[in-house]
Image (cartoon, helix red, strand yellow):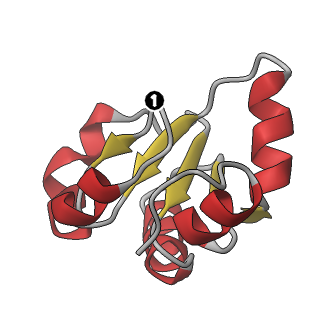
Amino acid sequence: MKQITPEELKLYMDAGNSPALLDVRETWEYEICHIDNSVNISMSLIPSRIAEYKPDQEIVVICHHGIRSLQMASYLETLGYTKISNLAGGIDAWARTIEPAMTQY
């Protein structure tokens, strides 16, 4: 699995790429702050909803600090998903480096 920094992800998306942004935090966390166009599916719901994504689809997994998303990215790879990236530092790093006006918690 690939680690992608907030800066790399922003540049990648600004270049016209649109990976699926899978935010695995709890709903209450997502409601505080999130990256536009991300989809919130809490970790506990992933097994029942993963079929919404194709195994060869490019997916960036996001959480608060990058630890839960790393676990989920590893899990997705065991299921055969091949284009998985973990947002290093999570939404916290995104807020600090890309969107400083974003609410942080």
* Residue bearing mark 1: 37
Residue at the extreme top: 16
Identify the amino acid type marked 1.
Asn
Residue name at image x 45 percent, y 29 percent: 37
Q: Can residue 51 be seen here?
A: yes
Residue name at image x 17 percent, y 69 percent: 44
Relative depth, front residue between 9 and 20: 9
Q: Position of residue 86 (x, y in %)?
A: 63, 63
Task: Determine whether, in the image, residue 50 is placed left or right of residue 38.
Answer: left
Residue at the extreme front: 101
Q: Is residue 16 above or below residue 97?
A: above
Q: Position of residue 42 (x, y in %)?
A: 23, 61
Q: Can residue 87 be seen here?
A: no
Dot 1 falls on a residue whose secondary structure is: loop
**Position of the N terminus by quadrant:** bottom right
Q: Is residue 91 above or below residue 19?
A: below
Task: Determine whether, in the image, residue 15 is placed left or right of residue 58.
Answer: right
Q: Is residue 68 above or below residue 4?
A: below
Residue name at image x 52 percent, y 57 percent: 61
Quarter-of-image position of residue 19: top right
Task: Determine whether, in the image, residue 47 is placed left or right of residue 32.
Answer: left
- Categorize mark 1 by other alpha carbons within 10 Å: few (<14), some (14-19), many (20+): few
Q: Position of residue 27 (x, y in %)?
A: 18, 58
Relative depth, front residue between 55 and 38: 38
Quarter-of-image position of residue 10: top right
